[in-house]
Amino acid sequence: MMVMADNNFLIKLVDDNETYRLFIQALERGEISLGLCTPVIAEFLVKDDNFDRATFLSKVNSFVQIFDFDMKSAVLSAKIFRDLLDSGYIKQNNNQRQVIKVDIQIISITLANDISKLYTADKGIVEIIDHLKLPIEIVNFENDELMGLSLFQGGD
């Protein structure tokens, strides 16, 4: 099963050795495949000039599929943004407009590629998905909800 991940999830993997080890084992066992969209990769690499982040991406490369912001994603992004404008969401959150644009790109790439699960603890992404009732299941990794992976269930 393919799951999309956001920047916060990648940071947790790099910063938390236990979660990283368990997640890599899940990838190796074929329990999941990890999807990364290009805006997430840019956000992940730009935060600080952390060598560990680039090393991490090269280590998981064989388990990761990269998704670009293509024409289908752009059309979906425009529709999501329009729906948020029409509902007044953008006006209420105008001070976060740039963050909202990146969140919309992540959501639209996820939808454009028929990926139904997104690893995130980003409240903005969750809020947009809930607000528009989009067909994406949020897996909040900070609440140890790692989607039933056997390695994260303690008893396996």
Image: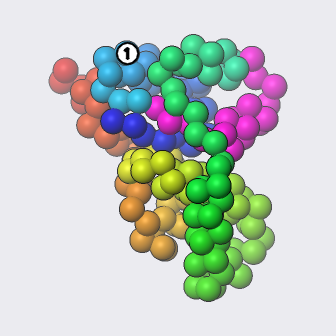
> Residue 139 placed where, x, y %?
40, 47
The type of residue carrying mark 1 is: Glu
> Residue 38 placed where, x, y %?
66, 40
- Kindly identify which residue carries mark 1: 28
Q: Is residue 68 above or below residue 89?
A: above
Q: Image quadrant for the N terminus?
A: top left
Q: Image quadrant for the C terminus?
A: top left
Point 74% across, 31% down: residue: 45
Q: Residues within 10 Å of mark 1 (few under 14, many from 20)?
A: some
Q: Is residue 92 above or below residue 113?
A: below
Q: Is residue 42 magenta?
A: yes
Q: Is residue 28 above or below residue 139?
A: above
**Along the viewing direction, whichever of 127 and 17 lies nearer the viewer:** 127
SS at circle 1: helix
Q: Which residues are magenta?
A: 34-51
Residue at the front extreme, as displayed: 71
